[in-house]
Amino acid sequence: MARIYNFSAGPAVLPLEALQEAQADLVDYKGSGMSIMEMSHRGKEYDAIHNEAIANAKELLGIGDDYSLLFIQGGASLQFAMIPMNFLGENQSADYINAGAWGAKAIKEAGLIGNVNVAADCQKDIPTRMPDLAECNWTDGAAYAHITTNETISGAQMKEIPKVEAPLIADMSSDILSRKLDYTQFDMFYAGAQKNLGPSGLAMVAIKNELAARGNIGLPSMLKYQSYIDANSLFNTPPCFGIYMLCLTTRLLKKKGMDAVFAENAEKAAMIYNTLDATDFYRGTAKTDCRSDMNITFRLPSEELEALFISQAAEAGMKQLKGHRSVGGIRASIYNAFPIDGVKCLVDFMKDFEQRNG
Ligand SMILES: Cc1ncc(COP(=O)(O)O)c(C=O)c1O
């Protein structure tokens, strides 16, 4: 089998064990004679998967029955619209942090629905960064405050979560379940599954029941959080296969233990940042105290060298290292499922590449 080291920012590498179990189950799920993709979402087999996925996620996140854990189609991008549709009323405004491309997209969507106050804007800053908490201008009486905890494209991560009066909502698409965090400080958080959880198209949403109950009741059912809560995310036919994959990945996280997951993620990131910092040949693009442990972004002395780096890395079995088209450079995304051996391989390659081209 020829698996490469896949540094994609998403859809990203999934645990090999989960893929292999899915492969074994694909045609005949545990003797049912059917694939997960072929069976009723109201049958006993799927029901067990659905409820295990929810229970696993809630346990890993450390959230209780005051939260609902929902599965919603449309990825994180639909959440950019659903949040203001549900919670941003007329004559209100919502606070947003703009620290990168994803925060900016969330702001654009919210602006189509209502009034937005940009509480801090450092989207264009170089090095890329998150705002200091002291520079954030929160509005009294805001409908909610929205943050993006990890900007996947720029590689900046929020190390300290702001404390605000308004309900706090976080896009955690690219760092959910990757580091030690008290999730009960959020009233709602969500993540597109395709980085740390499973396949794309599915968003995992955790929301305080009390917040959902205050949502706009005039919305169509599929756009209302309360519909998903009332139907345990089975209002319509859910993305069964994606939820099944998420069930497998969360099962593996439980088996490994989150402390071990967090320690390994920190070690993986430190290995690459230490290599960057040991030389002037590589230049990290995020401010040092905002460096992401999930998406490591850096430049080489020229675009020609960057292109050579990417193509030679690919020949050596390390793919999808090209930075996002909007920023260029190199981006190594090392989510939970990315193996530490792949990081060792990258670090060795970086040192060798510098020796040959520095
Ligand atoms: C931080 C963040 N938010 C939102 C999104 C959008 O997610 P989706 O493509 O699932 O809509 C992404 C996708 O990469 C992301 O990284």
Image: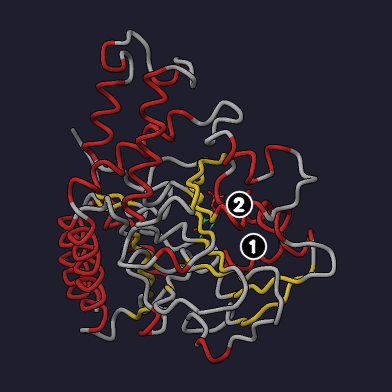
Camera-side residue of 357 and 270: 270
Image mark count: 2
Which one is earlier in the sequence, the residue at label 1 or at label 2?
Answer: 2
Picture layout, residue 164 above or below residue 149? below
Camera-side residue of 46 and 305: 46
Whether the residue under disc 2 has CB within 8 Å of ligand 1: yes
> What is the x, y in percent for residue 152?
46, 63
> Which colour scheme appears in the figure?
secondary structure
The circle on residue 41 is none
> What is the x, y in percent for residue 111?
76, 65
Q: Residues within 10 Å of mark 1 (few under 14, many from 20)?
A: some
Q: Amino acid at mark 1?
A: Lys
Whether the residue under disc 1 has CB within 8 Å of ligand 1: yes
> What is the x, y in percent for residue 56?
33, 44
Q: Which residue is mark 1?
A: 105
**Element under label 1?**
helix
> What is the x, y in percent for residue 175?
39, 61
Q: Which residue is mark 2?
A: 77
**Element under label 2?**
helix
Q: Is residue 123 left or right of residue 12?
A: right
Hey, which quadrant is residue 351 in on the image? bottom left
Q: Residues within 10 Å of mark 2 (few under 14, many from 20)?
A: some
Camera-side residue of 219 and 271: 219
Q: Could you tell me if the residues under marks 1 and 2 are in contact, i.e. CB atoms within 8 Å?
A: yes
Is residue 39 at least partly visible in the picture? yes
Q: Amino acid at mark 2?
A: Ser
Seen from this angle, which residue lies furthest right?
A: 91
Is residue 305 at least partly visible in the picture? no
Q: Residue at x 63, y 68 (%)?
A: 104
